[in-house]
Image (tube, rainbow, N blue to C red):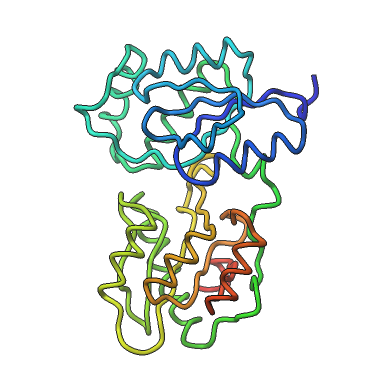
Amino acid sequence: MNQAAKKLGLIAGSGYLPKEIIDSCKVNSRDIFVIALEDITENTTINNTEHELVHIGKVGKIIKLLKKNNIDEIVLAGRVGRPSPSSLKLDFTAIRLLKKFMKLPSQGDDKIFSTIIELLEEKGFDVIGADDVLHELLIKEEVLGTIKPDKIAEKDIQIGVRAALEIGKLDIGQAVITQQGMILGVEGAEGTDRLVERCKKLHNQGLGGVLIKMKKPGQDRRVDLPSIGVHTIENAHKSGLRGIAVEAGGALIINKENVIKRADELGIFIVGIKAKKII
């Protein structure tokens, strides 16, 4: 069996990325089996797709379902968030995993995802990144659309990249918002959308701010690559931002044509950047 013919297993969180992976597999006639997480994966993601609905705490069951469906290759995609301990219905495998989490020197998302990948690899699965399936969604080093950042925006991007890399080293988040040389906010556990909403209240008069999203230094690119979609553009516009800068080769753009069209309509620039050329 060649690489392209392997049936793909998708552990799907929320958001647009899991649906993009499913649609790509259908277009390319690749079989896919989805583990949909209860109260996390949207119904619209798994419509007309082979799947099983499983509680996030049933890790052993997830592994058994993947093996039962002859899955060798797995991709993790979408947001999961931090469920409250009281809502978890942990099975034996999940309890063992939780014990590993508790021993980690840092319990940021990157460390947790790396531990999950280690478990899956121990069980004989090959874990790949979303960009291995969706090569065409990786952002290149370029301006997307008709609007370009000006000198003030370029300075904001430079400041934001430095800040994003620093919070990334601490495994805190991937995104920063800057405006006119000031850092308005950094992403925490709440995610990018909440960061954008929060910074709306901190918005200064004059030229709008810039959202910068960077992959964490040393991050395993198989999980949680930064991504933007139409909703990112619309949220940025509602919060008074005038541009978005993302890491070229380290971030995904969901529904590229519509994203660029909407950004041009709303007067927002999108640029793919290389950190080494910025700082």
Picture residue at 55% right of the left edge, 23% below the top:
51
Q: Where is 157 relative to 129, above or below?
A: below
Picture residue at 64% right of the left edge, 73% below the top:
143
Name the residue nearer the viewer: 81 or 170: 81
Taking the image as shown, residue 235 lies to the left or right of residue 10, namely left
Taking the image as shown, residue 140 lies to the left or right of residue 275, namely right
For the N terminus, the image quarter is: top right
Q: Position of residue 124 (x, y in %)?
A: 57, 16
Examine the image and state in which quarter residue 7 appears: top right
Name the residue nearer the viewer: 20 or 48: 48
Q: Position of residue 127 (x, y in %)?
A: 57, 29
Picture residue at 36% right of the left edge, 14% below the top:
93
Q: Position of residue 87 (x, y in %)?
A: 24, 27
Q: Where is 117 relative to 259, above or below?
A: above
Picture residue at 55% right of the left edge, 39% below the top:
18
Q: Where is 140 relative to 115, above or below?
A: below
Examine the image and state in which quarter residue 265 appears: bottom right
Q: Position of residue 257 (x, y in %)?
A: 67, 62
As drawn, the residue found furthest toward the right would be: 2
Q: How many numbered marks have been drawn onto this rendered protein structure? A: 0
Examine the image and state in which quarter residue 209 appears: bottom left
